[in-house]
Amino acid sequence: MLKWALQLVVVGLVVAVVIWLYGNYIDSTAEQNIPTDFGFLDNPANFQITGNELGANQPVRDALYQGLLNTLRISVAGIVAATVLGTLVGIARLSSNWIVSKLATVYVEAVRNIPLALFVIAGLLVVVLGVFPTIQEAWDLGGLAIISNRGVAVPWFIGAGLGLIVLGALGVLAAWLVARWRSSVSDRTGALPRSGIWGSGAFLVVFLIGWVALGYEWTLPKLDGRQTVGGMRIDPSFFALFFALVIYTASHIAEIVRGSIQAVPRGQGEAADAVALGGFQRMWYIILPQAFRIAIPPIGNQYLNLIKNSSLGAAIGYYDLTLVAQTTVGNGSPAVPVFALTMVLYICVSLVTSVIVNIANRRSALVER
Amino acid sequence: MSATAHRSGALVWARRNLFRSPLDGVLTIVFGALSLWLIYKTFSFVFVTGRWDIIRVNLRLLMIGRFPDAHVLRLAVTVVGLGAWGGFLAGFIRARQVRSGNVSDGGDSVLARLGDIAARLWLPGMVVLLLLLLSSTPGPWITVGMAIAAAVVGRAVGPFAGRRKFGPVGSGVVVVGLGAVPVALYFYVVTAVGFDDWGGFMLNLFLAVCSIVLCFPLGILLALGRRSSLPLVRMVCTTYIEVVRGAPLFVLLLLANVALGFFVPNSLAPATSTRAIIVFTLFTAAYMAEIVRGGLQSVPRGQIEAAKAVGLSPVRQTGYIVLPQALRNVIPAQIGQLISLFKDTTLAGIAMGLFELLNVAGAITAQPDFRGQGLIGETITFAALMFWTVAFTMSRESQRLERRLGVGDR
């Protein structure tokens, strides 16, 4: 009885506060004649995003969609790069090589204790705009990339992006099937599975056949006077944000990887030595799989942090979801619905990511009894 | 191993740690070259190419923002007061621990103690010294000197109070008295200069400390609520925690900046700095709740069962048995959260335009004397040094505390 009374009091308080806030909101928006519905989504966005397909008279809806895509782009690229760099640095910290381990320690201790915002702003103002050359003196990396302070132009494909994503998914599926087949062959005959080589081969075959069949083509970037033509130009802000996120998040992932490697029982490494595995084999086949079993949940948290931190791109003009929201509010969209929608989108992305991490965690978990 | 390897210790060491195998040798050469290049670049930036005039000229703006001249004395008094308070608290707690037998006293000579303190604090000490050397007025020197003196005196006086025995009323008075000192100092400063006029690194520190103190009770309540057996309370707390943890802090700050006016009547709408503190508090409380929840889960069931067996009420079980153990277990994680909050205070500058260190670092490069010279590298490096020193010192102290509390040993 008392329990229910207590609950009702708490919930009543929460509801009262929410009603009060909502009432204030309705009153003040009515007073200032600001809409509270989502009709603004159909209004013209009135701004353009360089590098995205967004015309000035397309609706706010499309602008937010492009913003979400940009957030996903930087997040996926950042997560992949930060995982690789973080794992390497985490292993390096435990290296028996004195210089390598000291350098990794200095990196982690220096980066972890400096705010990300400093890296983001320094990345744009100091590195991209300060170190990268002007377009007249652009660095041309053998025609594969042209680097200047206007951005980096890289080779790109011509054709529909969605088809390529489907093609990639098919390739991964083929690789997975072939890898499974190889391991079953290996189980039956005792031959080496070599599923890595076979899998990559299958992926390449499927991908290349699809590439030719669907008529995709490359374009290489070329310097043409004061601009680059062909390829795809990646905005300087993307680069600055990408490097800042990767350098910062990798320092956190490195600590997690180091802790997880140290948590793998010593006997595992000694057993690997006893059966005469080499240094790489010992790490790749014995230590890392067990370390990652421990590391998946905290690394997943870092992925979530990276996605949320990518909102800092708004500070340097990278048109992610946050900056698009800010811009449309500046252009007259009502602030509360826009930011509510933005938050819901971020929460959805976070939820999907954490579901994926949880599945990975469950699959890798040790099955006991 | 031939005889040559035995001849010199350095050679053996290099052989073991740098040139174990051919691959190892390659790594050593590559990364050795990289290190040398980095060291060279850093040295040449710090001593040759860096133009540090901009820092020297704007040091005051960077540290305390546009704090009015007339009231700087109050800040100095506050710093000295905090020094005395910190010293007293350290001595007091130490004496209490010795009295209760947790820590053995004596044995350590004064010299060893000083060595210990030097080992812990040489880094922030060096940075403070650097700041003092950069300053052009005697004020900071006097303030820091007096603060150190006050801390030493406080440390010497503290044990006398700590060794005394207090009744329930007496200990209440002591706790409230010690807690009241920083609050009183805060009001001493804020009655002269409201914190909308605060700025610089002082504002970053203040935002972080304020928010962490305020978020603490809220975080504990949310954690208890999430673990509560009452379904409705659990639902409310879980929703709050998950929503806040799913959204970026930057967006929440923007929202508070642009949209808070809609939800709160104008008479109640707080100023920008207060908004920042509110957002930081509400945001960190959700993370704090998850940390405390971890701590609550780490308390063995036997403890709760024992508390029930001796007939404690649910409130007392939580307050006397579960929470103290839970909070002790998560002190390092809490300090980690404090560090992360401290670093996040830079976002208040970007999202809300508060005049904190990073914002100042950007703004001073646009001064007429320094405009267009590309000095952002210098000012951001200075800001990075400030943040790094504080965060690094905090994380080292947290590791030390972890060792001393023996978390994980019991």
Image: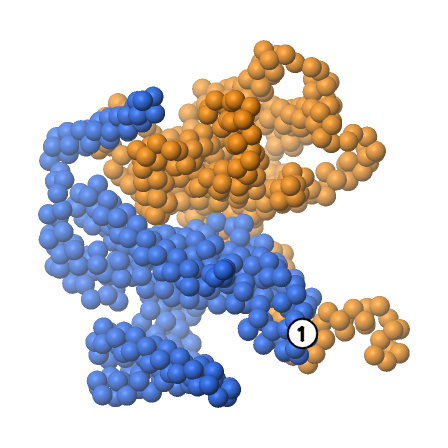
Chain colours: A blue, B orange
Residue placed most toward the observer, B267 or A24: A24
For the residue marked with disc 1, what is the amino acid? Asp
Q: Is residue A26 left or right of residue B244?
A: left
Taking A162 as reference, is B187 above or below it?
above
Residue placed most toward the observer, A191 or B372: A191
Label 1: how many residues lie within 10 Å, few (<14), some (14-19) or many (20+)?
some
Q: Position of residue A286 (x, y in %)?
A: 57, 71
Q: Residue at x 54, y 60 (%)?
A: A257
- The residue at which mark 1 appears reads as A273
Residue placed most toward the observer, B283 or A178: A178
Q: Is residue A99 visible?
A: no
Q: Is residue A167 left or right of residue A121?
A: left
Q: Position of residue A65 (x, y in %)?
A: 21, 59
Q: Is residue A359 left or right of residue B88?
A: left
Taking B1 as reference, is A237 above or below it?
above
Quarter holding the C terminus of chain B is top right
Taking B228 as reference, is A159 above or below it?
below
Q: Quadrant of residue A24?
A: top left
Residue placed most toward the observer, B264 or A313: B264
Q: Is residue A27 visible?
A: yes
Q: Position of residue A250 (x, y in %)?
A: 49, 60
Q: Position of residue A345 (x, y in %)?
A: 26, 52
Quarter holding the N terminus of chain B is bottom right
Q: Residue at x 39, y 33 (%)?
A: B228
Taking A101 as reference, is A18 above or below it?
above
